Image: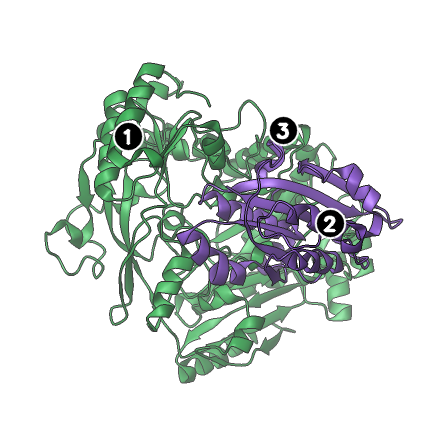
Chain colours: A purple, B green
């Protein structure tokens, strides 16, 4: 036996995969991304955020917990006008944001999982596809996958910058993040 | 989406058309794309034929609209399933018990109607989340606290009606116990206010719980007798100070005097915070646990208390701990902690560690380090702690809680531990199904909850094993007189079966009341094992 608080910490790892696993329609139309959410504890997420920022998308950083992001930014914004967001975070953040987005009839419209292997390679699993961002393409991007993913997602957005999908924009290799990260888009 | 059982498409379509007139077409959801948003993220049947799914959803914004929706449902025999915010994920979330029910989504009813600082109460609608109420109070600088569970996104009313609890002082953390007065739409569309609210123009609706005559509020807790559209709650005045202490004992049987002293302190109203009992000798879930202890635990049959105790005493690792947070005026809580220390010192060999006293309001820096819900601050931090890591390579997709009520004694804890160890092999067939626990919850005064967590994944074979195991634990615990105090929709019938005194007299009473207030059985069929007549299974 252990204390209730320790128990809750341990069971907090057991959060849900998004229900978007069952959806499979790739995003077809441009949409306006109001922000990119990154968990800045992870190097890959920081690279992702930087790339998206260069494409003109506002970056919002969390450290696992989305509470402040929700209360200060997203909730006030979505109450007046729900707007699409994208991100590279750990799974719990995506789970929470997906649940909250459902209240505004928004849902996960792209989702991929990025898992580091013990030998340093990455396994990318696309649960909800995005045109131009397949698992094959992510593997091909190698260590630059976060920038590549951010670039592909940024191209969805009406707020694109002049930095197109060239190798020059896919900068940054990532550090040794143990945590499996999730890239995603939430939109109406 | 599946039609409700026994409902013809024509009736369903007629009802839908009328709902669109009553609430506005944009608030009636019938497309698969919209209705899928009401799936239970933690369903142990996720993706299987038996997964409970809604057929549609209707989202009214006023009590009058709720009445209209309910009347239409009654007219056409359409089962409804009210949800507040639908975020009580460990206990069912937003999916109905009866597949095909139409979700009555009350999220749009999200007004904080009144908060009184001087009388320390709030009156809210069902769509008000803990976040919403906290913001309302903070924006106005009111010196009252809410009490909230770990995730702050849930509904204040919904959590209370589900029998939920929080983290601050008693009686506020008993969410249903802290309520005062309700407004309810009955299944026939009639509108009732309970307690002093039954007197027109009453100004004491949130001042006196009982009113006059039979107290009916309990009919709407964990049930399906009405749709609660307003509810009052007594709030805790912001305390001047908070202090906590932890008693540590080193012998297995010290749990007996430990719980006795804890109970005395609570019953004397010396300690009012959400206490906790820990078992540090077992080492928790993470790396860094004592390797000798881990080796003992891995033995067939696990570790004996005697073997663990030898390590606990030799290395001064506490066998048990008891943490006693307390809120109140500074002078008072300091005196209370001194008294509590004296009482725990009666256990030979025990030690006691006291925290620093904290004065309210906390600074931003203090709050950043604190477990925020202990101070009435809602948040979602509980979800952010874990992810797939090398330590946790296979995170799952949700969980179920088995939470039986156990008598308030150290002997009962020991008995439950033995019960768990005795049956684990049989229930799991020797397989590691990922159970966590049992842990002792002392946050409900006068009783204990011994909680076991069951992981849910997207693996259907694994989920079936988990469901079977859960049902087996419910039955075995019920045979010992330990009943679950709340549960997910998939197990509501199983748990209801354990409350079987006098051949199910309590269920018969529930059904008699149900048949009287909801003869067509349109409201939350099956919730907490209460089925309408036309859907009841024959019993011996």
Numbered label attached to residue B343: none
Asked if the residue under mark 1 is in contact with the one under mark 2, i.e. CB atoms within 8 Å, the reply is no
Numbered label attached to residue B464: 3
Q: In the rendered view, does B491 fall on the left or right side of B287? A: left
What secondary structure is marked by label 2?
Answer: loop
How far apart are labels 2 and 1 at the CA level?
45 Å
What secondary structure is marked by label 1?
Answer: helix
Asked if the residue under mark 3 is in contact with the one under mark 2, i.e. CB atoms within 8 Å, the reply is no
Asked if the residue under mark 3 is in contact with the one under mark 1, i.e. CB atoms within 8 Å, the reply is no
Return the residue at label 2.
A180
* Position of residue B24 measured from the top left corner of the image (x, y, whole percent): 29, 35
How far apart are labels 2 and 3 at the CA level?
27 Å
B346 versus A2 height, above or below: below
Subunit of label 2: A
Subunit of label 1: B
Residue depicted at 39% across the width and 69% down the height: B268
Mark 1 is surrounded, within 10 Å at the Cα level, by few (under 14), some (14 to 19) or many (20 or more) other residues, namely many
Return the residue at label 1.
B19
Screen quadrant of the C terminus of chain B: top left
Mark 3 is surrounded, within 10 Å at the Cα level, by few (under 14), some (14 to 19) or many (20 or more) other residues, namely some
Do circles 2 and 1 both sit on a common chain?
no
Q: Visible in this render: residue B485?
A: no
| Farthest right residue in view | A119
* Position of residue B504 measured from the top left corner of the image (x, y, whole percent): 37, 30
- In terms of sequence position, does the residue under pointer 1 or pointer 3 come before the other? 1
Looking at the image, which is closer to me, B38 or A123? A123
């Amino acid at each position: 036996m252990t204390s209730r608080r320790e128990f809750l910490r341990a069971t907090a790892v057991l959060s849900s995969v998004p229900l978007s696993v069952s959806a499979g329609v790739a995003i077809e139309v441009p949409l306006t991304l109001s922000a990119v959410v990154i968990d800045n504890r992870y190097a890959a997420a920081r690279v992702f955020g930087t790339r998206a920022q260069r494409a003109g998308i506002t970056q919002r950083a969390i450290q696992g917990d989305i509470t402040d992001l929700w209360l200060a930014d997203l909730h006030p914004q979505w109450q007046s006008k729900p707007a699409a967001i994208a991100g590279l975070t750990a799974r719990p953040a995506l789970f929470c944001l997906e649940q909250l987005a459902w209240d505004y009839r928004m849902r996960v419209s792209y989702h991929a999982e990025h898992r580091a292997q013990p030998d340093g390679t990455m396994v990318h699993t696309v649960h909800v596809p995005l045109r131009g961002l397949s698992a094959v393409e992510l593997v091909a991007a190698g260590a630059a996958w976060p920038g590549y993913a951010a670039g592909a997602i940024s191209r969805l957005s009406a707020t694109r910058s002049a930095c197109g999908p060239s190798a020059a924009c896919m900068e940054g290799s990532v550090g040794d993040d143990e945590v499996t990260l999730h890239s995603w888009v939430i939109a109406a | 989406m599946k039609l409700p059982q026994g409902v013809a498409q024509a009736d369903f379509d007629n009802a839908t058309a009328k709902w669109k007139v009553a609430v506005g077409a944009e608030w009636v959801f019938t497309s698969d794309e919209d209705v899928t948003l009401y799936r239970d993220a933690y369903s142990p049947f996720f993706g299987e034929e038996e997964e409970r799914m809604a057929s549609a959803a209707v989202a009214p914004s006023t009590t009058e609209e709720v009445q209209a929706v309910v009347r239409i449902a009654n007219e056409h025999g359409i089962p409804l399933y009210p949800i507040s915010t639908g975020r009580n994920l460990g206990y069912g979330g937003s999916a109905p018990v009866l597949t095909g029910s139409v979700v009555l989504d009350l999220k749009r009813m999200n007004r904080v109607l009144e908060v009184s600082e001087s009388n320390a109460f709030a009156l809210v609608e069902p769509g008000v989340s803990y976040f919403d109420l906290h913001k309302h109070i903070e924006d106005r600088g009111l010196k009252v606290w809410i009490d909230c569970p770990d995730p702050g996104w849930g509904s204040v009313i919904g959590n209370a009606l589900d029998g939920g609890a929080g983290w601050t002082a008693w009686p506020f953390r008993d969410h249903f116990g802290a309520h005062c007065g309700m407004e309810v739409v009955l299944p026939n569309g009639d509108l009732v206010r309970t307690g002093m609210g039954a007197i027109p123009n009453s100004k004491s609706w949130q001042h006196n719980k009982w009113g006059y005559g039979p107290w009916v509020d309990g009919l709407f807790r964990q049930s399906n007798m009405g749709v609660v559209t307003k509810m009052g709650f007594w709030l805790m005045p912001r305390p001047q100070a908070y202090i906590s202490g932890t008693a540590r004992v080193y012998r297995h049987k010290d749990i007996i005097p430990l719980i006795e002293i804890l109970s005395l302190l609570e019953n004397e109203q010396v300690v009012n915070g959400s206490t906790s009992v820990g078992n540090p000798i077992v080492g928790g879930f993470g790396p860094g646990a004592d390797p000798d202890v881990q080796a003992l635990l891995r033995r067939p049959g696990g570790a004996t208390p005697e073997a663990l105790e030898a390590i606990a005493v030799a290395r001064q690792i506490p066998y048990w701990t008891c943490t006693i947070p307390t809120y109140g005026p500074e002078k008072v809580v300091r005196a209370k902690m001194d008294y509590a220390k004296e009482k725990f010192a009666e256990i030979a060999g025990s030690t006691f560690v006291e925290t620093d006293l904290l004065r309210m309001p906390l600074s931003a820096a203090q709050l950043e380090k604190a477990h925020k819900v202990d101070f009435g601050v809602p948040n979602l931090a509980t979800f952010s702690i874990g992810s797939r890591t090398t330590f946790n390579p296979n995170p799952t997709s949700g969980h179920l809680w088995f939470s039986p009520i156990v008598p308030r004694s150290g002997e009962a804890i020991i008995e439950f531990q033995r019960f768990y160890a005795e049956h684990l092999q049989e229930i799991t067939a020797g397989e590691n199904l990922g159970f966590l626990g049992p842990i002792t919850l002392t946050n409900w005064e006068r009783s204990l909850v011994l909680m076991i967590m069951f992981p849910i994944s997207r693996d259907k074979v694994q989920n079936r094993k988990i469901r079977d195991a859960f049902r087996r634990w419910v039955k075995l615990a019920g045979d010992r007189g330990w009943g679950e105090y709340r549960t997910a929709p998939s197990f509501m019938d199983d748990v209801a079966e354990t409350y079987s005194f006098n051949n199910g007299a309590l269920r018969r009473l529930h059904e008699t009341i149900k048949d009287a207030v909801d003869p067509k059985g349109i409201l939350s069929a099956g919730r907490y094992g209460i089925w309408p007549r036309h859907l009841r299974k024959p019993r011996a």
